[in-house]
Image (tube, rainbow, N blue to C red):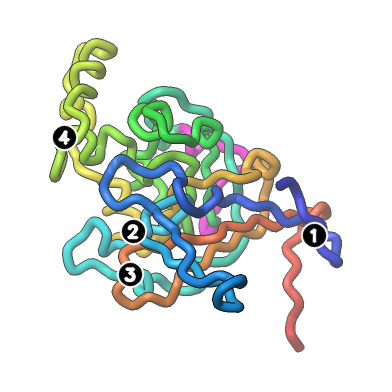
Amino acid sequence: MGEIIGANGLRYYELSNVYGHGVPQWPSAANLNVRVHKFHANDGIFVQQIESIMHRSTHMDAQLHVTENGKSLTGYDTWRFFGTGVVVSIPKGKWEVITPDDLEKANPKIQRGDILIINTGSHHKLGDNDDYFAYSPGLYKEAAEWIVERGVKMLGIDVQALDHPLGTKLADHGLGPSHPHLDGEYKALTGRHILEDFPHWEPAHKIMMGAGIPGIENIGGDVDLVTGKRCTIMAFPWRWHTGEGCVVRVVAVLDPEQKFRIPTGA
């Protein structure tokens, strides 16, 4: 898609992946299916019907998704959905973990109150494949604690989930393992079982969202074009008072002058 130049000279960038019928999805039930309900030749209007869970393509999770009696989407403070932030490059490969040291050394520097977008390079592998969904890198407990301590406002990442895949039900956590073969592969690679290195089930989800930080999974689009930049970033979910997740459109706005410009409205 590339940058879109607004009338005021600001550059707009798409950080979302495509949403629609047959998009790559996390290994679980309920595909995203779309059918035409009404069409112009017959009905004079075009209407589509969607069957899906909300956790498809680029989307925001709510605390309720992973914590019983947790807050829903409307439990987030709306000021968190818009503001200044950074898109940082933290290149990672198969099963590598994003560490507090990675975040500390990120460029531009992550400041208190920033919206944080992490580019691991994994969005280039997006597809119906194990490389993206089973073998991706990711956040885990220690990085999530760092993010909370540093006062990050909202977070997005270009991998399959807010948590490392070996901290999900793909391994022997919660309802898992849905992918029991991964433990043998991990032991052959590291000499250890998965639960020795990933004993907690979805800790990044629970820690960040428990602190009120919205978490966005499957960042993509033109994220490479703004990586290494300080931007204005926005992503708004539905006002769904019982919602545990919601597809979102994530947009970064880059000011070539590197200023933060919002009209006063006066």
Q: Inspect the magenta stretch and tell me whether residue 109 lies in it.
A: yes
**Residue 128 occupies which quadrant of the picture?**
top left
Could you tell me the amino acid type at mark 3? Gly
Residue under label 2: 53
**Pointer 1 and pointer 3: residues touching (CB < 8 Å)?**
no
Which marked residue is nearer to the observer: mark 1 or mark 3?
Answer: 3
Q: Which residue is mark 1?
A: 10
First in sequence, mark 1 or 4: give its number: 1
Q: Name the residue type under label 2.
A: Ile
Q: Which residue is mark 3?
A: 243
Please give the range of residues in magenta: 102-114
Q: Earlier in the sequence, mark 4 or mark 3?
A: 4
Q: Is residue 185 left or right of residue 7?
A: left
**Residue 118 on the magenta segment:** no
State if disc 2 and disc 4 touch (CB < 8 Å): no
Q: Image point 58% across, 35% down: which residue?
A: 89
Could you say where residue 239 lies in the image, as x and y percent from the top left?
42, 77
Residue lying at 37% horizontally and 39% vertically, measured from the top left: 139
Residue under the point 55% across and 32% down: 124
What distance separates the C-alpha of mark 1 from that of mark 2? 35 Å
At label 1, the amino acid type is: Leu
The residue pinned by badge 4 equals 177
Q: CA distance from mark 3 to mark 2?
A: 11 Å
